[in-house]
Image: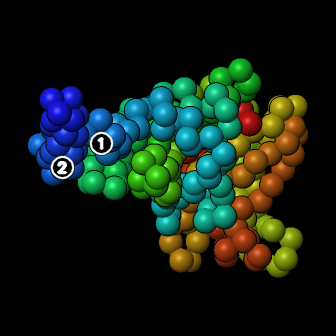
Amino acid sequence: MKKKLILFATFLFMALFSTVNAWGFFGSNDKKEEPKPHSIPTKEVIANDLIGRSFTEGRDDGYFGVDWRWRVEDGEIYDLKILNTVKEDDFCSFILEIKFGNKTKRPPKYQGRLQVDYGLQNNRWVLEVVKSKGVEIVKTGRYTDNISTKIGDDGWGGVNQLKIKNNTDSSLIVGGAVRTGNGWRKFSVILKGMEIKGVGGTFGGGNVEDYEIHFVEAY
């Protein structure tokens, strides 16, 4: 009889413990904490995420035109600074100052500002948007004397254009501005060794009245 009472008391205690534990008084070993979102991307992570992404000059009155694109290759970003950060629960945005170009090859190199936006997907920050806030070529001043320029007839009957000649056997990129009847506009041209190209004229924006050269760099 005594043995039966002990077994009954043990059973009663275990049943009571299970009920109380189910109510949460003793907690649960099976309870898992919700995973915390990763910290926002560092500049090293951002630089890596930009590989393969493309962006424009980011200006309506730039040198390179609306169709010009830069595509970031591995190792080309050699300086990156985060100027501003906006953080929300599932979104973060950065304003960056970057310098990029292939350091092992010839110039040119470029510098500019980008806006990059990240979204939180499956507890991971994913780069969603890359937007240019302005890109420009790094001016060294080393190649300015390697071109010849003049305003002359474009060969189509009394309309002038700016003619630029590369006086070296290496490729150059030349940027500047020409003034036509519609005012000033910027341009850039890539010249192979000893090549001559025209800016403006009958099929290039109109009669060129004046011009400025803003940069000449190796390309």
Give how far across and how far down residue 199 sits, in percent: 71, 61
Q: Work out whether residue 17 or residue 148 is closer to the camera in this orientation and state it.
A: 17
Answer few, some or many: residues within 10 Å of disc 1's Cα (few below 14, many 20 plus, some between 14 and 19).
few
Question: With 117 as the anchor, is 140 left or right in this view?
Answer: right
- 57 shown above or below 147: below
Residue 133 in view in this figure: no
Instruction: Tell me the CA gap for discs 2 and 1.
Output: 17 Å
Q: Name the residue beneath numbered marker 1.
A: 31
Residue 19 disc label? 2
Give how far across and how far down residue 15 sits, in percent: 21, 45
Assign a secondary structure to mark 1.
loop
Answer few, some or many: residues within 10 Å of disc 2's Cα (few below 14, many 20 plus, some between 14 and 19).
few
Question: With 81 as the anchor, is 106 left or right in this view?
Answer: right
Q: Residue at x 72, y 26 (%)?
A: 106
> Which amino acid, by three-letter code, is at mark 2?
Thr
Q: Residue at x 71, y 33 (%)?
A: 218
Q: Residue at x 58, y 71 (%)?
A: 180
Q: Earlier in the sequence, mark 2 or mark 1?
A: 2
Give how far across and how far down residue 161 sits, in percent: 72, 65
Question: With 64 as the anchor, is 183 left or right in this view?
Answer: left
Q: How many marks?
A: 2
- 216 shown above or below 55: above
Q: Residue at x 77, y 59 (%)?
A: 198
